[in-house]
Amino acid sequence: VDKAIEKARELNCSGTIWNGALLHLEYSARKKLHIDIRMPIGMTIEETQRAYCEALGVPYDESCITPERMLFITDKESEIYRSPHWYEVLPAGRAEEAQTSLPGPWTHYRRANPARHPAKTTQHSTFKTQHSTKCSRPSTSGL
């Protein structure tokens, strides 16, 4: 768990698609680890999970992407890190961009209505996750 925490912090400050994506770290009820990240635009939940696990150097856990998965809320001492952007409202257009970048009904609708939904260029996130903290060591929430 400690190695995964350190690697998650490294990825959050790296020059990869995971830069600034770390939103929350906490110990699970079983004292394993929950990592909440912002999904890169154009990736499905499964693609994100697989790619992040690979970057993190941990085995992919298929149970993490199923809708019936249950997360148990833990006490405040279990929280390791919380980004100031955790549960933040997405910037204007970001939710639509994420929805239209994936195959499915949104893509079909966008193609059927090109004047209303022009093609967009995908750019990976550049938002900052920490405010005036050193990138290599995000601070804990202090709650």
Image (tube, helix red, strand yellow):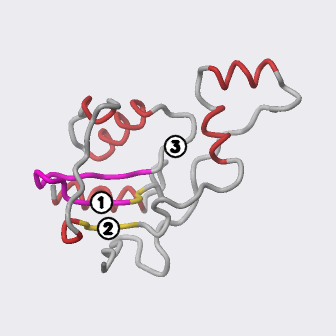
Q: Is residue 24 left or right of residue 18?
A: left
Q: Amino acid at mark 3?
A: Pro
Q: Is residue 34 left or right of residue 99?
A: left
Residue visible at 29% across and 47% down in the picture: 56
Q: Report which residue position mark 3 lands on.
A: 40
Q: CA distance from mark 1 to mark 2?
A: 5 Å
Residue 29 is a magenta residue: yes
Q: Report which residue position mark 1 lands on.
A: 25
Residue nearest the observer in this picture, 41 or 87: 87
Specify the farthest residue to the right.
115
Q: Nearer the viewer, mark 1 or mark 3?
A: 1
Looking at the rendered image, the quarter that the C terminus falls into is bottom left
Q: Main secondary structure of the magenta part?
A: strand
Q: CA distance from mark 1 to mark 3?
A: 18 Å
Quarter occupied by residue 25: bottom left
Mark 3 residue crowding within 10 angstroms, few (<14) / some (14–19) / many (20+): some
Q: Report which residue position mark 2 lands on.
A: 81
Residue 18, above or below 111: below
Q: Amino acid at mark 1?
A: Leu
Residue visible at 71% across and 48% down in the picture: 93
Q: Which residues are magenta?
A: 24-37
Looking at the rendered image, the quarter that the N terminus falls into is bottom left
Q: CA distance from mark 2 to mark 3?
A: 20 Å
Residue visible at 35% across and 70% down in the picture: 136
**Can you give x and y, in whole percent of width and height, for residue 43 in the image?**
50, 34
Residue visible at 33% across and 73% down in the picture: 137
Q: Is residue 6 left or right of residue 123?
A: left
